[in-house]
Image (cartoon, rainbow, N blue to C red):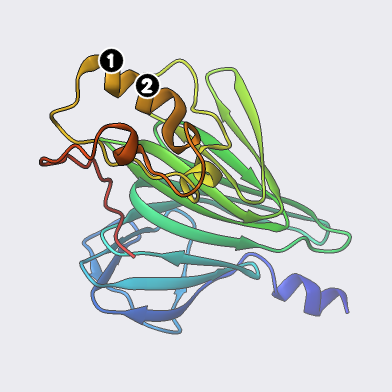
Amino acid sequence: LVFTASSAFAAITVVSVKGDALYSDGGAYKPLKKGQQLKEGTRIQTGTKSQAVLDIDGHMVTIKALTLIKVYKNIATQDASTNSIGLKYGSINAKVKKLPKVKTSFLITTPVATSSVRGTEQNTSNGPLFGMQVFVPEGQLNVMSNGENRNVRGGLGYNKKEGDPRSDNVSNPMQNNFIGRLNPNNLTDEERDILNQYGDQLVDSTQTPADILDNTEGSATVDMNLIWQ
């Protein structure tokens, strides 16, 4: 039983590869292949419309398109499992198991912050424009950055840009599922302030902000952050 448990740890296995994915374990980059074993310190890079799935000590990590990661740590004993992934840019999904009688530490580090995952799932993205974004479908995790510690529960998220002293409100991802704003360009400053403050709560549900603003017409500007899936 001890031998079986030990052999399941300290192993990085490529479960699947879709499209173009490369790896480097200290030398030149080479094509990543299904079924191969990787070692601590390996870098992995995916191309457009590509992804790779890793089994790291029983934890499943999906590396999405246009992403660069490095496996900093992959250490295991009979009673502890320690893994650390560096996300330079792009997006990953991590499903981390809570192993019985095993102290599990699974860190995802970006230039902005570090998330600590245990027995949960998280989607993590990092880029120069939007910084680090973490969404937790279920469970709970902790994010640490320059002395700031935030607990993020299922359905909520974390967002912080590099250089910002504090992160955004953790409820923002949930709010974005319910609130959408599309403001015409030709609003007056007063109209824009009213709309931003009250939104569609100004009137009953049969009316919209456009009704309040006399059906103002015109072009609109929409800001979007695109994350490859």
Q: Quadrant of the C terminus?
A: bottom left
Task: Tell me the distance, in whole angstroms, between the alpha carbons under discs 1 and 2.
Answer: 6 Å
Question: At label 2, which amino acid type do we have?
Answer: Ile
Question: At label 1, which amino acid type do we have?
Answer: Glu
Q: Decide: is 209 above or below 33.
A: above
Element at badge 1? helix
Residue 114 image point, x, y percent: 53, 36
Disc 1 target residue: 190
Which residue is at a point 46% across and 35% down the rendered structure image? Answer: 159
Q: Decide: is 192 above or below 79.
A: above
What is the crowding at mark 1: few (fewer than 14 residues within 10 Å), some, or many (at least 20)? few
Relative depth, front residue between 5 and 166: 166
Left or right: 113, with 213 as reference point: right
Which residue is at a point 41% across and 44% down the rendered structure image? Answer: 207
Relative depth, front residue between 97 and 129: 129
Left or right: 155, with 123 as reference point: right
Disc 2 target residue: 194
What is the crowding at mark 2: few (fewer than 14 residues within 10 Å), some, or many (at least 20)? some
Which residue is at a point 54% across and 29% down the rendered structure image? Answer: 169
